[in-house]
Image (spheres, coloured by chain):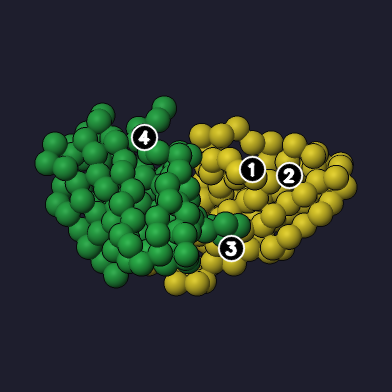
Chain colours: A yellow, B green
Amino acid sequence: EADIYQTPRYLVIGTGKKITLECSQTMGHDKMYWYQQDPGMELHLIHYSYGVNSTEKGDLSSESTVSRIRTEHFPLTLESARPSHTSQYLCARPLAGKAYEQYFGPGTRLTVT
Amino acid sequence: DAKTTQPPSMDCAEGRAANLPCNHSTISGNEYVYWYRQIHSQGPQYIIHGLKNNETNEMASLIITEDRKSSTLILPHATLRDTAVYYCIVRPGYTGNQFYFGTGTSLTVIP
């Protein structure tokens, strides 16, 4: 099941930089999700996709954007990073053969200085 | 819009059963009860889910009351590696798969 990959695992970057967090999977799943979790806080859905060229915003408003040009990749972009973007970003997909359960990647821990 | 209520924290002695409660008094007929856990700094991990019958797998047991307004996750022999935040989630099984995580219960297994 460990086929959802996120890079980088850790990123420290200065304010104003553009960053892209990568999420990829090899199982060909249509549905993919991005969650954001501030330290010690709740996990919130920020973006999801049901397939190529399909992206939707989640229940937590985010300044990030996503794209889904290929099934395998679901990158998240911050055009101009700010300290308020410091958080952990988790990518997820359905479990194989169990469409209504989710499998999470290892996450990217972002720190904006 | 909290659909579930869980205690914020619990302790359990190593080797004993950990019983984590969850109230979901407004659950509707087509909603399942899911349990996930999140070990520090990692992504959440699926544990178990059920609709109305009790369920058991290699990780845990799920006991759902007859009126489905509450449930209990049971870890039969807790180990130190079970220390984590446990999330109880109710959602329809057929929707677009979004999961809404609350604050969960922080379980600490004590040696």
The answer to whether residue B82 is left or right of residue A111 is left
Q: Residue at x 30, y 60 (%)?
A: B17
x and y percent of residue B69 in the render? 21, 35
Work out whether B19 lies above or below A103. above
Residues beneath discs 1 and 4 located on the same chain: no
Q: Residue flagged by tag 4: what amino acid is it?
A: Thr
Q: Residue at x 40, y 64 (%)?
A: B14
Disc 1: which residue = A38
Asked whether the beta carbons under mark 2 and mark 1 sit within 8 Å of each other, the answer is yes
Dot 4 falls on a residue whose secondary structure is: loop
x and y percent of residue B101 in the render? 45, 42
Disc 2: which residue = A86
Dot 3 falls on a residue whose secondary structure is: loop
- Give the crowd class for mark 1: few <14, some 14-19, many >=20 residues within 10 Å: some
Number of numbered discs on residues: 4
Q: Chain of mark 1?
A: A
Q: Chain of mark 4?
A: B
From the viewer's side, name the closer residue of B13 and B43.
Answer: B13
Residues beneath discs 2 and 4 located on the same chain: no
Residues beneath discs 1 and 3 located on the same chain: yes
Q: Is residue A95 visible?
A: no
Q: Residue flagged by tag 2: what amino acid is it?
A: Thr
**Mark 2 or 1, nearer chain start:** 1
Disc 3: which residue = A106
Disc 4: which residue = B5
- Give the crowd class for mark 3: few <14, some 14-19, many >=20 residues within 10 Å: many
For the C terminus of chain A, which image quadrant? top right
Q: How far is disc 2 from disc 1 in space, using C-alphas?
A: 7 Å
